[in-house]
Amino acid sequence: MSALRQTPLTCSGHTRPVVYLAFSDITPFGYFLISACKDGKPMLRQGDTGDWIGTFEGHKGAVWSATLNKEATRAATGAADFTAKIWDAESGEDLHTFSHKHIVKSVDFSMDSSSLLTGSNEKLIRIFDVGKPDADAKVTFTGHGSHIKTALFTHCDKQVVSASDDKTVRVWDINSGTEIRKLEFPSIPSSLEIAKDGSTLVITYGNYTSFWDAISYEKKKEFEAPTQINSASLHPNKKVFVSGGEDFKMYKFDYETGEELESFKGHFGPVHCVRFSPDGELYASGSEDGTLRLWQTTIGKTYGLWKCVMPDEAIPNSDTPAVKSEA
């Protein structure tokens, strides 16, 4: 398969940089992909093809974060209009707005979708009860010294892990509302991901992708890339990870050794976000160029819109055009 050419699916429709993306779990209707963009219009797509389903209309500023609950029935977004919103992901209806006093950079649902976690430029992390949309936050964490970049539920919703511009990643106990661990970095953590099985924390900073035990919060391994890395994602089987950053390329590395396995150019600007699909068959990237691209984990495999073409069936001296999924 290595002799075959990676042909990403290009998902257009956004008009500004794509800064965050997230997949749902696998549902009876497949899985879904949501993207956050500085154009203020988060979009929902079919995850395996990139086909546009709908746009959530209502924010009045750049959208910095977007996520789906596991069933893909609800979406949440955080934006520069100082709000987080919850949406009906099937109808696109704006269900509720949670007001903040500064830009909301991160949103995350609890496992049962009953709670919404937000992180903002107020340096605060809040947990709201989705069933009581008019109530104040039921838990507020204070301690970060600068803007929150990402905040995620972990440990079966008993803890929160957060990354901040203060060059730390912190762990919080929800029951007590206290900080229980602080990880310090030489530069600002650029992304945070919890592996699909919950065992590993993926943190990027500078040119490095680091992997941490999600129970003990001890570092397991760390690998350097040829460029500043903005985002990384670990495959569900934990054999490979992918990353993207300032040199416009997508990289795939061996998780055990850190060996670079593949690198691909496709985007025309820095890569801001990357994520593996829930089945691990593809990974998605979002870029400064305003597009999302879907990349095959196993090049040449028939999956989604990709059809397997054996090398002897290929037309000599011809470039295979990228398949486009237009919004």
Image (tube, rainbow, N blue to C red):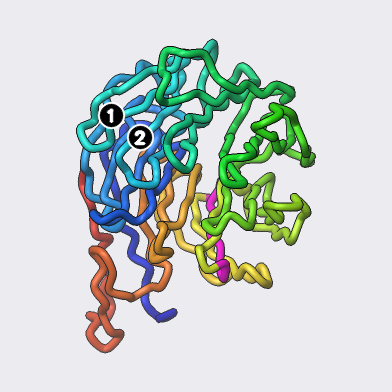
- Label 2: element kind: strand
Alpha-carbon distance for marks 2 and 1? 9 Å
Q: Nearer the viewer, residue 277 or 11?
A: 277
Q: Which mark is residue 75?
A: 2
Left or right, 132 with reference to 314: right
Q: Which residue matches tag 1? A: 56
Q: Residue at x 41, y 50 (%)?
A: 267
In the rendered view, tell whether residue 304 sits above or below residue 1.
above
Residue 17: quarter of image = top left
Residue segment shown in magenta: 238-247
Residue pictured at 58% horizontal, 54% vertical: 198
Q: Which of 51 and 108 is in front in this view?
A: 108
Could you tell me residue 80's position as x and y percent? 46, 19
Q: Residues within 10 Å of mark 1 (few under 14, many from 20)?
A: some
Question: Which secondary structure dominates the residues rendered in magenta?
Answer: strand
Identify the mark nearer the N-term, 2 or 1. 1
The location of residue 31, given as percent across then percent down, is 31, 53
Q: Which residue is drawn at 76% across and 52% down?
A: 216
Judged from the image, the secondary structure of the residue bearing numbered disc 1 is: loop
Task: Give the position of the C terminus as an image quadrant.
Answer: top left
Is there a contact, CB below 8 Å, between mark 2 and mark 1?
Answer: yes
Relative horizontal placement of residue 290, taking residue 250 as reference (left or right): left
x then y, percent, for residue 119: 57, 26
Q: Does the magenta stretch include residue 245?
A: yes
Image position of 225 with respect to 167: above or below: below
In the image as oriented, which residue stretches furthest toward the bottom?
312
Give the answer, above or below, for where 55 lies relative to 100.
below
Residue type, numbered disc 2: Ala
